[in-house]
Image (tube, rainbow, N blue to C red):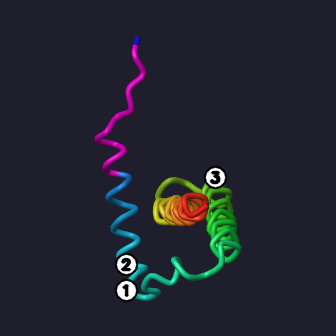
Amino acid sequence: MENKIDEELFNEFFDAMLERMREKQKVYGDSWKDCTKLHLKNRLIDKFDDWYSTMRRNLTLPDKKQLDETKLLVDIANFAMMIWLRHKKQFKER
């Protein structure tokens, strides 16, 4: 049996990432392109910590009282993408 990536789900996640990037771009512009990679890595850790705390809290609550984790997960993915792009650019220029 062949393992295939479900492109529809991948595209749905990509759309969520793009929508969130556009929201944040209104506030921060393209500052991620010029800030230090360390800053991006620290923000990734911060977002992961935020998600982890929310996820742990949600484990103790009934479904109706849980907080939505989706934006935090998309933020984590976006920071990972920003770091990946910066590394890719750095090593391409060598």
Residue 74 shown in magenta = no
Quadrant that contains the C terminus:
bottom right
Instruction: Return the x and y of residue 7 as percentages of the image width and height.
Output: 31, 39
Nearer the camera: disc 3 or disc 1: 1
From the viewer's side, name the closer residue of 88 and 36. Answer: 88
Type of the residue with mark 2: Glu
Magenta residues?
2-12
Instruction: Return the x and y of residue 25 as percentages of the image width and height.
Output: 40, 81
Residue at horizontal 40%, vertical 62%? 17
Residue 80 showing in the rendered view: yes
Q: Secondary structure at mark 3?
A: loop
The residue at which mark 1 appears reads as 26
The residue at which mark 3 appears reads as 59
From the viewer's side, name the closer residue of 44 and 40. Answer: 40
Q: State the mark number for residue 71.
A: none
Q: Answer whether labels 1 and 2 touch (C-beta < 8 Å).
A: yes
Q: Is residue 2 above or below residue 67?
A: above
Q: Is residue 67 above or below residue 43?
A: above
Q: Tell me how far mark 1 sits from mark 2, CA to CA.
A: 6 Å
Q: Tell me how far mark 3 sits from mark 1, CA to CA.
A: 33 Å
Instruction: Return the x and y of residue 13 as percentages of the image width and height.
Output: 38, 52
Residue 55 as seen in the image, left or right of residue 29: right
Instruction: Return the x and y of residue 45 as percentages of the image width and height.
Output: 69, 66
Type of the residue with mark 3: Leu
Type of the residue with mark 1: Lys
Nearer the camera: disc 2 or disc 3: 2
Residue at horizontal 42%, vertical 22%? 3
Q: Secondary structure at mark 2?
A: helix
Q: Answer whether labels 2 and 3 touch (C-beta < 8 Å).
A: no
Q: Secondary structure at mark 1?
A: helix
Q: State the mark number for residue 23.
A: 2
Among numbered discs 3 and 1, the one appearing first in the sequence: 1
